[in-house]
Image (cartoon, helix red, strand yellow):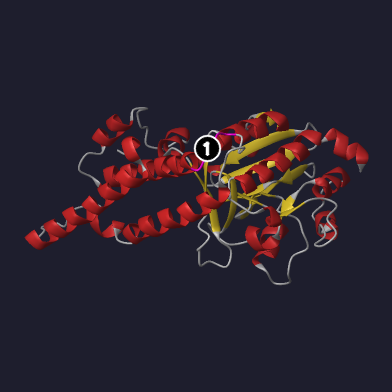
Amino acid sequence: MEETRAKHSDIIEGLTQLLNLFAELRYIYQTDIHSPPHLAPQIDVPLLQRAGLEAEVIDLAQLLPALRNEVIWGYQEEGIEMIRHAKLANYFVQPAGDCSEDFLNDMRWADYTDKNKGLLPPSILRLTFPTYYYGINVLYDVSDQSIIEWCSLEYKKWQDCPRQPAKAFFSKILHKFRTLEYIPFFNPEDWDEVPNRRVIEDPRIFQNTFIGGIRLPPDYQESLRRFRGTKQETYLRQLVNELNAWRKLYRDCGWDGAGTAFDAELFERKRIEWLRASNDLLFDLGNWTEPPNPQSEEQRIAREEYFQRWEALWAEWVGDDAL
């Protein structure tokens, strides 16, 4: 076990730093993190053995920090994203009949929705499951200590995706969270049994990355002009302003990238204020993204008043960066 710990120190240290950073950012809480040795709950070693994973992979699973079952396992968007569209997994013993059993039984499927697309080699440990079918699979290969990021939307096999050292991968992800390029979204008042914790980023990135995505220019105003008068314009403004509101909220509470001056209690209070204010308006957004055709004078006035409320919200929570 000590040999495994030394050989895979980069992924152990990287994941440990990332989960601790999540707690600093109030994406999760420190009590959500289980550090090895995992005594209660235990890693489901018999399950990993039945899956045919190599002994080194099974040893590594017992040396990695992990998040408790109650915040990890859920369907669709429920759970905790590590990066955009990639939900963290764990390998603890699961409650009988829980949905997590379904996922873990399929852990070696390259595409967890379709066994016919082949199995991952026994040297690979799955770190994430995709959010929906288009999400990201983050895989770690013990044979060369590399990370593979694979998305089915890329129309290529996971074997053809580039590999990167675990240290480089986690350094990149840690930097994006510390600089607020990635925003960790969590609503403490989420009603779902497993809350939806997701990563927010510039909405143009995912569109511009994958085949078939809408190619948007780097200038926000130019992107908006491309969609002028359509519901896409409304949605793009909404997403960009939401991103900037979260960034401003973190910075107003002292986030400097290191967390040394961060007022977490103030952030918790302001986060609830922001979520309640924005959710009240979000509930009706779909009704007003495009004007009714034809529209009555009453509808026109109601639509204008609705978006005036958004403008007031952006002025308060986004300030000069509002679109």
Query: Visible in this render: residue 131?
Result: no
Instruction: Determine which quarter of the picture holds residue 260.
Output: top right
Residue at 53%, 60% (x, y): give it: 188
- Name the residue furthest bottom: 97
Q: Give amino acid for label 1.
A: Glu
Instruction: Determine which quarter of the picture holds residue 105.
Output: bottom right
Residue at 22%, 56% (x, y): give it: 306
Residue 265 place in picture, x, y as percent? 55, 52
Residue 256 place in picture, x, y as percent? 55, 34
Residue 275 place in picture, x, y as percent? 42, 56
Vertical arrangement, residue 256 with respect to residue 81, above or below: above
Instruction: Determine which quarter of the picture holds residue 115.
Output: bottom right
Residue 256 lies within the magenta run? yes
Residue 283 place in picture, x, y as percent? 34, 61
The rendered magenta stretch, by its main secondary structure, is classed as loop
The reply, left or right, for residue 123 in relation to residue 205 is right
Would you name the residue on which mark 1 appears? 154
Residue at 64%, 54% (x, y): give it: 29
Q: Quadrant of the N terminus?
A: top right
Q: Which residues are magenta?
A: 253-257
* Element carrying mark 1: helix
- Name the residue furthest left: 297
Q: Quadrant of the C terminus?
A: top left
Residue 11 lies within the magenta run? no
The reply, left or right, for residue 285 in relation to residue 179 is left
Query: Visible in this render: residue 13?
Result: yes
